[in-house]
Amino acid sequence: MAETIDDKIKNYRTAPFDARFPNTNQTRNCFQNYLDFHRCNKALSARDQDVSPCEWYQRVYKSLCPSSWVGKWDEQIENGSFPGKI
Amino acid sequence: MAHPTLLGFQDAVSPVMEELLHFHDHALMIVFMISTLVLYIIVAMVTTKLTNKYILDSQEIEIIWTVLPALILILIALPSLRILYLMDEINDPHLTIKAIGHQWYWSYEYTDYEELGFDSYMIPTQDLASGQFRLLDTDHRMVVPIESPIRMLISAEDVLHSWAVPSLGVKMDAVPGRLNQAAFIASRPGVFYGQCSEICGANHSFMPIVVEAVPLEHFEKWSSLMLEDA
């Protein structure tokens, strides 16, 4: 499983079609991947496991989310005011 | 691109726009034929000396002018629905570009690999170089590779805008806090113009969009150059 994740990350071109978000409004797609990246990091590092699989979510949210949104959310996480649950 | 005597659509650059153009030709031809027929009938009715006060009904013609319009509507609906579903097909994009509307310029982000972002301002009329188009050319163009499915994600930072490029067949509202997806393929190289399509303040007419479609190698060279300059 880890090898295929690494392959997927290595051959990453852009965020693939996600059937959970088939419509025009991709706002949730961006936000969900941002959340999943941080949750993945938190969960894997809590068990002292390798966090490299989480890079997939990072690549996807970096592709999809406007940089201003990412900057704002990163700042909110740093000062503890991020509205999502991680 | 648009020119002063343009009557129809601009030449299509994406396959979807080609379909839309041909469908419009088809629907418009039907409309012209119906209008011509009606106009002919009106003129004929008005200019005839013949009168007949005794026709009460006619089953045959009633059937014809009920069935024929229904058939015409089906003839319009079938290609229309075909294109509608074609536009909704799941495609596998090669590249994602974000276009973000501001008052009064667009900013483009290419973040699949590196963090490339830049603003695109209209060139003021007094600063136009020879050969550039007034109110249409910008300082930086959105460069895309040809023949690659592109995913556009459109949003805005302040008020509503709309990202439109007619020759690509794309128009998508830019809504603050929302990420709208549109897709296109540039089938041939060239430079394609569009303008902001949602009223957004004083300079709404002065924040155009320029897309430059180039072969992949040129796109790669351009993106390396842009990253260096940033």
Image: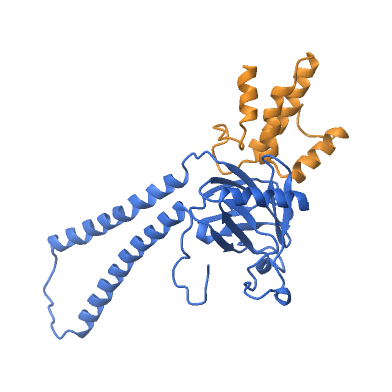
Chain colours: A orange, B blue
Residue A23, picture quadrant: top right
Residue A46 image-quadrant placement:
top right
Q: Position of residue B175 (x, y in %)?
A: 66, 51
Furthest residue to the right? Answer: A79
Q: Could you tell whether B16 is left or right of B102 in the image?
A: left
Give the residue displayed 81% in from the left and 37% down from the top.
A74
Direction from residue B201 to residue B56 in the image, left or right: left
Judge by depth and name the residue closer to the eye, B106 or A50: A50
Residue B102: x and y, percent? 72, 57
Taking the view exactly as shown, the residue that stands out farthest to the top is A47
Does any portion of residue B198 appear in the rendered image?
A: no
Instruction: Please provide percent x and percent y for residue B9.
Output: 46, 65
Picture layout, residue B40 above or below residue B87: below
Q: Residue at x 68, y 30 (%)?
A: A57
Q: Tell me which residue sits at (76%, 50%) in the image.
A: B228
Compared with B44, B198 (above or below) is: above
Question: Is residue B91 visible in the rendered structure shown here?
Answer: yes
B140 and A23: which is toward the camera: B140
Counting from the top left corner in percent of width and height, residue B216 is at 57, 48
Q: Give the total of numbered labels.
A: 0
Residue at (58%, 63%) from the top-left corner?
B193
Which of B230/B100 is in front?
B230
> Of A84 and B60, which appears nearest the observer?
A84
**Is residue A5 left or right of B77 when viewed as pictured?**
right
